[in-house]
Structure formats: C-alpha cells, structure tokens
Amino acid sequence: MTNKYLPTFDSVTFQLNKIGPGPIAAIAGIIGCLVIGFGALISAIYFFGSEAYSPSNHFVSELGRANASGSAHTFNLSLKVGGLLLLIFGLALGRYLQQSRVAKFATAASVVASLSFAAIGVFPANEWTPHMIAAGTFFTTAMLAIVLFSYCIWKNRQWHLHRFIT
C-alpha cells in the first residue's frame, strides 16, 4: 500500500537532478569541511610536542601522530569522515557539470583527492611512506580538481550554481 502524501523515488530523483548538485551534496561538502576543521582544532589544542602547536612551526600531519597529540585519533577520524563527505560533494558536482571531457576528468580527480584525503587519516605521519604517498596524491589531485571544476563553471555560464557555491 502506498501513501499518496509521500513522494516516490522517481519524483525525488527528478527533483534532485533538476536543482543541480542537490542540497544533500552541498550540506555534505560543508559538513565535511567543518568536521576536518574542528578535528584539526581539537587536536591542536591537545598537542603536546616540544612546544605548543603552531602552523608556522609544525606540519599539519603532526596533529595525527599519536606521540604528539592527545587527540590524534580525533584528527585522523575527522580526515576519514571529512574525506568521504567531500567525496559525496565532488561526485554530485561532477554529475551536475558532466557535459564535457574536462568535467569528467575533474570528477575523477575529485574522487581520487577525496579518497587520498581519507587515506591520510588511515596512515598518520607515524607511517611515513604511505602517509606521504597519500598526502602527495591528495594535494596534486585536489588542486587539479579545483582548477578543472573552476574552468568548467567559468566556461559555460549557463549552469547556474548558487552564488554561495561559486
């Protein structure tokens, strides 16, 4: 028995496709950034290295080292969760802009960047080699995704993204 007041799956899918990346994806992107930011802040507060944590004196990766921060697990978990939330945002943005090869390449770069960001939390700085591979992959592919998505949005102004996103 169906309820006439509840939307069907097809009508919800159509409505999400019609409005662009969708509010769920936008919220996932915002929450992902907040989770990462608060994870870094909490870990910086409980940092017990040779001196208080300062971005000018320490690598961000040091926040995830168990022997340098009392809440390294919080930082590493925030990277994992934040990376997965940013994956949702990147896939939705790519699906919305999927009109050209450049947009498809940007989506692929975004997926790799999000997964490698989560991998940074899986391999903290204590495990140097896999951590550096994950971090290097993240920084390279994230910059590539940002540049390519920006180009796609700039090139075709018929896509109307909310001014908050752009």
Image: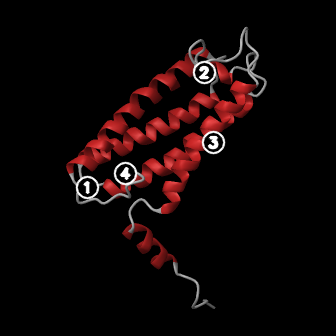
Please report whichever mark, 2 or 1, sits nearer to the chain's N-terminal start: 2
Q: Secondary structure at mark 2?
A: helix
Using the numbered discs, state the Cα–Cα distance from disc 1 to disc 4 in whole angstroms: 9 Å
Of all residues, the one furthest to the top in this rendering is: 50
Please report whichever mark, 2 or 4, sits nearer to the chain's N-terminal start: 2
Q: Is residue 59 above or below residue 80?
A: above
Using the numbered discs, state the Cα–Cα distance from disc 3 to disc 1 in whole angstroms: 31 Å
Q: Secondary structure at mark 1?
A: loop
- Given the image, on which type of amino acid does mark 3 rest? Val
- Which residue is disc 4 drawn over? 94
Q: Is residue 112 above or below residue 61?
A: below
Q: Quadrant of residue 44?
A: top right
Q: Secondary structure at mark 3?
A: helix
Using the numbered discs, state the Cα–Cα distance from disc 2 to disc 1 in whole angstroms: 37 Å
- Given the image, on which type of amino acid does mark 4 rest? Gly
- Which residue is disc 2 drawn over? 61
Question: Which residue appears at 42% of the width and 53% of the height?
Answer: 164
- Which residue is disc 1 drawn over? 99
Q: Is residue 137 above or below residue 12?
A: above
The answer to whether 59 appears left or right of 70 in the picture is left
- Which residue is disc 3 drawn over? 35
Residue 152, position as x, y percentages in the image = 26, 47
Question: Which residue appears at 31% of the width and 37% of the height?
Answer: 147
Give the number of the mark in front: 3 or 4: 3
Residue 144, position as x, y percentages in the image = 34, 33
Please report whichever mark, 3 or 1, sits nearer to the chain's N-terminal start: 3
The answer to whether 135 appears left or right of 40 in the picture is left
Please report whichever mark, 3 or 4, sits nearer to the chain's N-terminal start: 3
The answer to whether 140 appears left or right of 129 in the picture is left
Residue 159, position as x, y percentages in the image = 28, 59
User: Split into 4 quadrants, where in the image is the N terminus?
Assistant: bottom right
Do the numbered discs 2 and 1 sit on residues whose CB atoms are within 8 Å?
no
